[in-house]
Image (tube, rainbow, N blue to C red):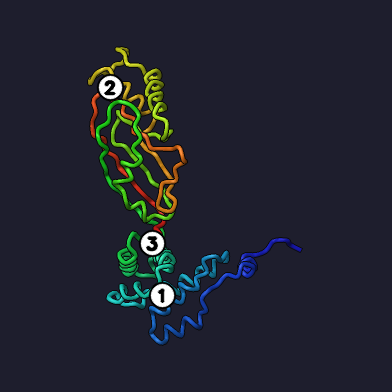
Amino acid sequence: MSNQIDDKDDDLSINVVEPDENEWKKFIDEMKYARALEYVLQNAPVRAKDPEKKKKAAQMALSTMMKIKTSEIPQAVNSIPVALRDTLMKYIYKGFENPKDYSSSALLTWHEKVLAITGLGSIMAWFQRAITLSPKKRGFHIVTNEILQQIPEINQIEIGLMNVFIQHTSASLSINENAAPDVRVDMETIFNKLVPEDNSYEHLDEGKDDMPAHAKCSLLGASLNIPISSGRLALGTWQGIYLCEHRNRARHRNIVVTINGQPKK
């Protein structure tokens, strides 16, 4: 006797729900399409391991969407509880995988309306903004708050990731100690020893600090990825974002911040 449990038995063990086809057909026969769609979404087998259950539910949802007139889509989306719109968007994406079975133009309209009504969007939200950091003297500077003040949208993300990218080759980004200022002094000392300023370099177009600045930038890096949790950066207690300024002459620094994550409900 095999000890393996097939997917269908596994679904029974975790009490997976799924839409009843006869119940769904009643709504369809009564031309209550928005209600039929909501019924499928409410009973979507999202936890099912049996692919046939998921496929059948997707077909029911998508065929229902195709019956709703374009002019009635906004009203239909508004009638669907916010908590179910993630599932709706998943089915829309599923429909795009089968262009022969479902109208791509209709699905694009559904996609547009769901995003417009739901705000930042369903499933995953993307956000990007170019910001500027004020001029800093040469050295290591904590800029966590200066960045966050320019991207209040992070408060709307429940869980996600923030990428911070600096658009320069003579300054860099890092994460390190946010409390003791002598750490930042020592960091400058360490990197000056690692990459000394002298006349041994070929590239000295803008002075002795020119080529060392490029080298330090490559050593430290131009971007950071930081997790977002409950609308806040998931930094450690003693962690802060550093702007590492490697040039003697202070200047504004341009940063591109990109956020990807699940919006708060």
- Which residue lies at the image location 43% right of the left edge and 69% below the top edge? 84
Q: CA distance from mark 2 to mark 1?
A: 63 Å
Among the 4 quarters of the image, the one containing residue 203: top left
Cα gap from disc 3 to disc 1, whole angstroms: 21 Å
Q: Amino acid at mark 1?
A: Ser
**Residue ID for mark 1:** 63
Give percent across and percent down for residue 7.
Answer: 62, 65
Residue type at tag 2: Asp
Q: Nearer the viewer, residue 111 or 139?
A: 139
* C-alpha gap between disc 2 and disc 3: 46 Å
Q: Which circle marks residue 222 in the picture?
A: none
How many badges with numbers are in the image?
A: 3
Q: In this picture, is 147 found above or below 25?
A: above
Placement of the N terminus among the 4 image quadrants: bottom right
Asked if the residue at tag 3 contacts the one at tag 2, i.e. Cβ–Cβ closer than 8 Å, the answer is no
Residue positioned most to the top: 199
Q: Answer with the quarter of the image where residue 205 lies.
A: top left
Does label 2 or label 3 sit earlier along the sequence? 3
Seen from this angle, which residue lies furthest bottom? 30
Residue carrying label 2: 210
69 up-or-down from 54: above or below: below
Q: Is residue 16 visible?
A: yes
Residue at which label 3 appears = 122
The one of 55 and 169 positioned closer to us in this rendering: 169
**228 w.r.t. 8: above or below:** above
User: Of residues 39 and 209, which is closer to you in this image?
Assistant: 209
SS at badge 3: loop
Residue 59, x across and y down, in percent? 45, 72
